[in-house]
Image (cartoon, rainbow, N blue to C red):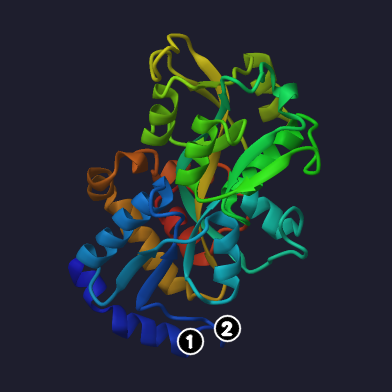
Amino acid sequence: MKKMLSILGITVLIFVLTASSAHAREISIWRMGTGGMTGTSFLTGSAVALMINEKLDGVRAAAQATNGSVDNVFLIGDGEIDMGWINSTTVRQAVEGVGSFDEPKPFLRGIGWVMNQTLHIVVNNNSGIETVEDLRGRRHSVGAMGSGTEVNVVAVLDLFGIGEDEFTRLHSSTAEAWDQVVSGHSEAFISFTTIGGASVTDALAQGSTRLLQLTSEQVQRLVDEHPQFAFQEIPGGTYRDFPYTIYTIASPMLLVVHEDISEECVYIFTKAFFENYDFLVGQSMLLEPARPENSLLGMPVELHPGAARFLREIGVLQ
């Protein structure tokens, strides 16, 4: 691979001279928008940046902390970043021009699925919230304004018939949002995060919060009606005082780029991403599901030609 990648400059030059699009953009430094510095997107983004810096000749990368998925869509559109960690719900809203987006964002193209983020509905014990329906009219921590967390909170409540004007939003950093629900300043925090992650574990360990339960029938209905989500089980014993299986949904986190990046650049990145799987998992076990055969999971947008080219080469695409 080193030998092949060492001729990147020549390959890119040939591509520029022969590309059918005069607007194809070459990448020498991948600017990758992730999420908050305490979140899993930044952690996995840092692992990918390290892989690029160690494994690819002539290409560098840097993970950038951002306000999350929605912010990353706008940053890609403005040319402030080249790649974003964006959850599937936000990607779908962006391409359709709904939710947080006044108009469609047709420039988005996919590379692949990175990991699942699992729905946790954490409520304060003094809130009186016993069912999903009780979330109506409550104070909800929603993370930073315009973040993927806020999009997901609104989307999840909407799934249960609770409109975006039927609850109070408390904006803060993600770390502050967890503190708010623990202290009771907010009554609930709806978060898509990793199973067994430190934030959820620490919040539940305080003794002032609990996980709101969903039935398997509720979860299956959500998945059937909204295919951007997947059925997810949190094994019993994952969290203190929860010895039984918890049924919930998962939202895929996707790697997304701008359509104007050249096919060759995205091809080289995609090839390196999947061929250095062991290195990436060694940096973060959160990347364990990021295999080529999972690339299309939850992908609501067209693949970038460079990514599609690599996936066709290895037989994932026909």
Q: Quadrant of the N terminus?
A: bottom left
Q: Quadrant of residue 220?
A: top right
- Residue 269 to residue 6: above or below: above
Q: Is residue 182 left or right of residue 105?
A: left
Q: Is residue 1 visible?
A: no
> Which label lies toward us, 2 or 1?
2
Q: Is residue 213 left or right of residue 111?
A: right
Given the image, on which type of amino acid does mark 2 rest?
Ser
The location of residue 111, given as percent across then percent down, is 49, 57
Q: Residue at x 58, y 76 (%)?
A: 78
The location of residue 121, given as percent across then percent down, is 58, 28
Q: Residue beneath label 1, please? A: 18
Between marks 2 and 1, how big is the CA–CA gap? 9 Å
- Residue 288 to residue 272: above or below: above
Are there few (<14), some (14-19), or many (20+) residues within 10 Å of tag 1? few
> Which of these two is toward me, 254 or 148?
148
Query: Which element carries disc 1, helix, strand or loop?
Result: helix
Give yes or no for contact between labels 2 and 1 (Cβ–Cβ under 8 Å): no
- Residue 15 to residue 167: above or below: below
Q: Quadrant of residue 164?
A: top right
- Residue 13 to residue 108: above or below: below
Q: Residue at x 42, y 50 (%)?
A: 41
The location of residue 12, given as percent across then percent down, is 37, 82
> Which of these two is toward me, 282 or 198?
198
Q: Residue at x 77, y 32 (%)?
A: 137
Q: Is residue 186 left or right of residue 60?
A: right
Are there few (<14), some (14-19), or many (20+) residues within 10 Å of tag 2? few
Given the image, on which type of amino acid does mark 1 rest?
Thr
> Which of these two is toward me, 315 or 269?
269
Disc ID at residue 21: 2
Query: Which element carries disc 2, helix, strand or loop?
Result: loop
Residue extending furthest toward the top: 243
